[in-house]
Image (cartoon, coloured by chain):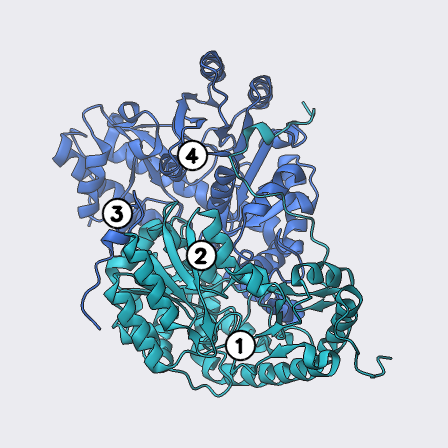
Chain colours: A blue, B cyan
Amino acid sequence: MTAPFDVTPLLAPNTPAPAARYNGFPRFNFIGGHNDPKNVPVEALVEAATAVLRREGVTLATYGLESGPLGYRPLREFLSSKLKDHAAIDCSPDEILITSGSLQGLDLVNSLLLAPGDTVIVEQETYGGALTRLAKLGVKVIGVPLDAEGLRLDALEKTLADLKAKGITPKYIYTIPTVQNPTGAIMGVERRKALLALARQYGVLVFEDECYSDLVWDGDRPPSIYSMAGGEGVIFVGSFSKSIAPALRVGYIVAKWDILSRILGLKQDAGSGALEQMVLAEFCNRHFRNHVPKLNKALAAKLQVLREALAEQFGTAAEFGNPPGGIYLWIKLPDVVDTVKLAQAAAAAGVSLNPGPEWSTDKAYAKSRLRLCFANPEPETIRQGVATLAEVCRREFGVPLRSANIDRA
Amino acid sequence: MTAPFDVTPLLAPNTPAPAARYNGFPRFNFIGGHNDPKNVPVEALVEAATAVLRREGVTLATYGLESGPLGYRPLREFLSSKLKDHAAIDCSPDEILITSGSLQGLDLVNSLLLAPGDTVIVEQETYGGALTRLAKLGVKVIGVPLDAEGLRLDALEKTLADLKAKGITPKYIYTIPTVQNPTGAIMGVERRKALLALARQYGVLVFEDECYSDLVWDGDRPPSIYSMAGGEGVIFVGSFSKSIAPALRVGYIVAKWDILSRILGLKQDAGSGALEQMVLAEFCNRHFRNHVPKLNKALAAKLQVLREALAEQFGTAAEFGNPPGGIYLWIKLPDVVDTVKLAQAAAAAGVSLNPGPEWSTDKAYAKSRLRLCFANPEPETIRQGVATLAEVCRREFGVPLRSANIDRA
């Protein structure tokens, strides 16, 4: 009975390529949304797990604990309070759905709204995982260029008008207005209001992704678009991945009940992981407000280490800003550099990076750009990784012309 | 900006109905796969959480911990050992993918194989969630009748031959051979071998769901079909929901790498919840082998409480077996009873049940049948719930003719 069985004739059409075997993290890990190991609040998580399990552990015997399918109620209550303080959102715990990471939030919103051939608007540079999901769904994705404050409204208005002239209503405008991924931009209040007005004028939903909004160095951020709309016509997603720990797969969707109830009808997973929700709720109620500034302080310091290392190793060949928060730096290298090829060569040298074209709808614009995540490596590892990247880049593309004369011993 | 926004023009076609608001569990909770609250190993989970977080908590800063996308390696190592002892499966930890509950396993396998119009074979009475998923995918589902040992092979062979005559290769045969849901049947060794031979003869995958296989009262069970095939042409899913706690959303897929690598390529969720995996691994390595027999003892006792209550309240009007394991009893009421209507009337009296037609491809056959889960309610609650159900049933359908003359004060 052990003759090989060839599954390929049975596969659904267009299944993705098989995954490669895992070989561990690279030495210089600048990809993904990994975070700072020194700021995982281990002892506080132990205390939280102990307290919540002793108090309510027996409820693990039931799907949904005793909170129903929206997720663990104390976590939704924490979020209701936190979102009010932080994002000016006035929502009840029953307008919050806990998801298995904000990625499940993206999937559920897409599942609610999108059919093949539909059109959506995104920021021209945006989260790569959102782009791959949309491509897989057969959806037409229109990228609108960004400036230092995020989505350019002149370009958005032109896009909406052009689509309307063709009889097309895009399903949503996907925006990351507070610490944009990858640029780190924070959209100001007036632009948020104008974006919302445009969306309403054209009958388009705003899909507001606030995964990074806790990570603002000075803690100061504009109200969410959701709050400005009183929740009407806006779907909001957030996450604990970036502010506590990415391996905890807990995100959330905020929406008015007419939308949330439909999303909930699509969430057929028998609930998101209960232990993670319970421990997070217990931890956040005690420590969230103290934890986040501490994490931000560490991240802000790492950002400066990365910026200094880039300046040292690449000189003027690397252009980048000074983002007010987040875990990413978006970098422009000379036009001669193809960052997809750079990523391959760098991987061989132990440096992982996200090439720009994966994070943009405009592959030509993004060709010489890349994203580095500075949250995970220690400062010295950041310096060594950037030095290695500069060596690889010079070898492959001839830039930077000179490397820093520093002793790497 | 707070004028209401009507989302309905933007919805994708065929989105399901909005979910109802949650109103708490019913007083007599006989649905779903809820488990015994007294057997949630709370203190051992506290110990496990404390130990694993102190030892490895910092790894929460990275997606996938340091184990890669297949899931927390110590949990896969535990499973590799457990499956060998328990199901005779010889697989490496790299042939196991941890999923967010076995439901994600179902979704991933369906996603790998199924396109609208495809055909699959299932057991005529089977897990309702599998049926609703297949219906949503636009897949043709053929149910093969069961007997006391599970899937009837004469009927399976006829189905396969009929399909072949029409030029149709079904994508898989979905079977729950060890404690079938809902009947509780355990398929014997010879029938497993014959099923596998038939599947190979017709070039069909076997999709083996072992969610309940830990819950065999005497611990004695045949080798898995997967083991008999050396893994070739079989995809195996399992879960910790039934043997530890359903609110922990941790399941797994076992498959050869050529299949598993393709499934992994479809799993775009940035990993399943890490804390649940870490705590489960730590707990299971210390306590799994002692925990399961203790749970089984409690469940076996509750089953007998339910059987006695049914006999007392329904007399000969309720027909049922004495399953060798699991958490469900599958019951036949007189033909006059429509269990979909019974479920509605019973809900109003605080009794929840799963009507047969939701768990069967043959709605007529299942019309007077129902599934009761006996794991969650305490014995006295089981007795009261069955008495209430008998009252509702007599009022609505005139059966049972007489109720037991017991004092319910």
Instruction: Using the image as rendered, state which of residue A154 and residue A95 is in the foreground.
Output: A95
| Residue A67 drawn at (x, y percent) | 66, 57
Please tell me whether mark 4 or mark 1 is closer to you in this view.
1
| Residue A331 drawn at (x, y percent) | 32, 30
Mark 3 vs 4, N-terminal side: 3
Report helix, strand or loop for mark 2.
helix
The residue that disc 1 covers is B326
Mark 2 vs 1, N-terminal side: 2
Label 1 to label 3: alpha-carbon separation:
38 Å
Label 2 to label 3: alpha-carbon separation:
19 Å
In this rendering, the count of numbered labels is 4
Report helix, strand or loop for mark 1.
loop
Instruction: Using the image as rendered, state which of residue A78 and residue A358 is in the foreground.
Output: A358
Report helix, strand or loop for mark 4.
loop
Where B295 sits versus A11, above or below?
below
Kindly indicate the quadrant of the structure image that contains residue A162.
top left
How crowded pointer 3 is (Cα within 10 Å; few <14, some 14-19, many 20+) is rated as few
Could you say which disc has been placed on residue A17 in the image?
3
Where A28 sits versus B367, above or below?
above
Label 2 to label 1: alpha-carbon separation:
21 Å
